[in-house]
């Protein structure tokens, strides 16, 4: 008779939790997983997946406009927001079912319940009003949009969660923040015909990316008609007699819009789940503190994904899940590798990037070479669209290793995935130079930039 009901109990049915549950169950472990909302988590239900679908929806007006140069006459078009929302709902319901089915298919048990830790081996299932026990416990409860209680009138604002399911498309919208979510949603709503203003407190949007790309994206977004106010924050949001929202900005200006969306970061979901009682250590932001194997200070309790506030990306949570299973169930301790993570911002145009930005490289290496190409992609020649593509490789002059690759333009996300391989492998610029181009593509530029555009030696650009 086993000492516990389960070998593994997973709390949270998002990308990380489901992967760990499924893989552990397929090893023959007795696994259960509890999710209080919907299986699939942020990524599937109110993040990456619906976001990307909305990005596609928002790109059609440009495709229609570009078609003329290729000989097409596009009749008058119209857009129906409720149709998009309903079709998105159908797709995420399908994916949600698959997530759940995959756990069950591997032999795991799924619960629809909030789960609260009672002690280091016991979990209380609220919806079932019973306590179960497990040898190992994995917490993968994710995160949620950071609230903004300091903002007067914050109760009138929405977050990305609500933005997906608005009853109607607003005429005008303000988005606060300059990160992934703010920038992606600004492009989505603008593309769908909403008058959009992005309000960002810093000097330039997307603070963690290469400055060249940040500036070029900013310019392109403004050219499309998105208003971007930098060095600016909202100070007060109030409802006016017409039922619209007046937003007082730090510069003294007032914006009148129909929706204000806050995208100022995300915080971990760690409240009211018994963590403090069991003694699981939390960091300053409320995130669960873990070691490189995702183990907490309690040796049979583990945590992965956004709840640990390491790198908030779906593939990272999945990687952490796989490392956890190796460590906890396969006798193969595997540290999580957070180095050189390719990533994309689904702005319009897209950003795809991997490795060090030029500024970061300059801080770490005394001598770097920058290979930079800015050109009009072929698809914009006949369309007449005045939009440039930007590609940049940052190379360590001493070792010739490519430290960073940065792309702004169509399909940049797809390219970043492939560039992730040579950069992770530590390949040199010579390996890029030896690679045959695929013609005609935009990506061929990455293997045909033979001469450095400039060099930065001891902080000085040559
Ligand atoms: P980010 O951390 O990317 O950006 C937060 C933004 O809010 C920053 O511009 C920040 O400014 C600003 N900010 C923070 N606090 C305040 C404040 N009090 N007042 C005004 N502005 C403030 O968070 P997001 O919410 O955009 O996204 C959360 C995470 O989700 C991302 O970090 C990313 O990991 C993930 N994500 C990934 C996507 C993808 O892979 N394509 C898509 C969407 C989300 P500052 O720059 O000055 O700090």
Image (cartoon, rainbow, N blue to C red):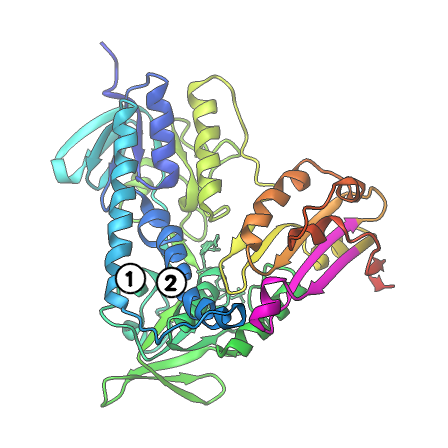
What residue appears at the point 71 percent right and 59 percent down from the top-left corner? Answer: 359
Numbered badge on residue 206: none
**Residue name at image x 77 percent, y 49 percent:** 395
Seen as rendered, the residue at the extreme top is: 1
User: Is there any visible trace of residue 217 in the rendered image?
Assistant: no
Counting residues from the start of the chain, the first of labels 1 and 2 encountered is: 2
Marks 1,2: beta carbons within 8 A: yes
Q: Which residue is mark 2?
A: 57
Span highlighted in magenta in the image = 370-395
- Rendered location of residue 424, percent (x, y): 65, 38
Q: Is mark 1 within 8 Å of ligand 1?
A: no
Q: In which image quadrant can residue 317 be found? A: top left
Distance Cα–Cα, label 1 vs label 2: 8 Å
Residue 25 position in % (x across, y down):
32, 22
Residue 305 visible in this rendered orientation of the protein: yes
Residue position marked by numbered label 1 in the rendering: 84
Total numbered labels: 2
Mark 1, Cα crowd under 10 Å, few <14 / some 14-19 / many 20+, is some
Please tell me whether mark 1 sits on a helix, a strand or a loop.
helix
Q: Residue furthest left?
A: 129
Q: Is residue 239 above or below residue 417?
A: below
């Amino acid at each position: 008779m086993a000492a516990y009901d389960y070998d593994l109990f997973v709390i949270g049915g998002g990308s990380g939790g489901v992967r760990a549950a499924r893989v552990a169950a397929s090893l023959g472990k007795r696994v259960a997983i509890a999710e209080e909302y919907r299986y699939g988590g942020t990524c599937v239900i109110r993040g990456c997946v619906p976001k990307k679908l909305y990005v596609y929806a928002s790109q059609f007006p440009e495709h229609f406009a570009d078609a003329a140069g290729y000989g097409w006459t596009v009749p008058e078009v119209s857009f129906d927001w409720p149709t998009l929302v309903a079709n998105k709902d159908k797709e995420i319901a399908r994916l949600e079912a698959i997530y759940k089915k995959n756990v069950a298919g591997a032999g795991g048990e799924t619960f629809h319940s909030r789960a609260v830790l009672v002690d280091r081996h016991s979990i209380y299932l609220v919806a079932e009003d019973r306590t179960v026990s497990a040898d190992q416990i994995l917490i993968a409860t994710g995160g949620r949009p950071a609230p903004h209680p300091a903002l007067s009138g914050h109760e009138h604002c929405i977050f990305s969660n609500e933005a997906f399911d608005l009853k109607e498309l607003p005429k005008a919208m303000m988005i606060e923040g300059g990160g992934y979510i703010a920038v992606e949603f600004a492009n989505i709503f603008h593309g769908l015909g909403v008058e959009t203003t992005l309000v960002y407190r810093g000097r330039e949007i997307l603070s963690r990316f290469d400055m060249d790309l940040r500036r070029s994206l900013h310019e392109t977004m403004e050219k499309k008609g998105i208003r971007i106010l930098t060095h600016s924050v909202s100070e007060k949001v109030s409802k006016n007699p017409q039922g619209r929202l007046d937003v007082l900005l730090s510069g003294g200006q007032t914006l009148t819009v129909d929706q204000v969306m806050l995208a100022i970061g995300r915080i971990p979901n760690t409240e009211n789940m018994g963590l403090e009682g069991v003694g699981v250590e939390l960091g300053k932001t409320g995130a669960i503190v873990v070691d490189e194997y995702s183990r907490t200070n309690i040796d049979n309790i583990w945590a992965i994904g956004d709840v640990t506030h390491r790198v908030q990306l779906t593939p990272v949570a999945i990687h952490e899940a796989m490392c956890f299973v190796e460590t906890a169930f396969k006798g193969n301790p595997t540290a999580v590798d957070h180095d050189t993570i390719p990533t994309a911002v689904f702005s319009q145009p897209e950003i795809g990037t991997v490795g060090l930005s030029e500024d970061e490289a300059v801080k770490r290496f005394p001598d770097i070479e920058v290979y930079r190409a800015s050109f009009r992609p072929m698809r914009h020649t006949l369309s007449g669209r005045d939009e440039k593509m930007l590609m940049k490789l940052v190379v360590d002059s001493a070792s010739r290793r490519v430290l960073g690759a940065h792309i702004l333009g169509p399909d940049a996300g797809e390219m970043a995935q492939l560039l992730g391989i040579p950069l992770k492998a530590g390949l040199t610029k010579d390996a890029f130079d030896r690679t045959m181009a695929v013609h005609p593509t935009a990506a061929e530029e990455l293997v045909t930039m033979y001469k450095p555009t400039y060099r930065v030696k001891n902080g000085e650009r040559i």
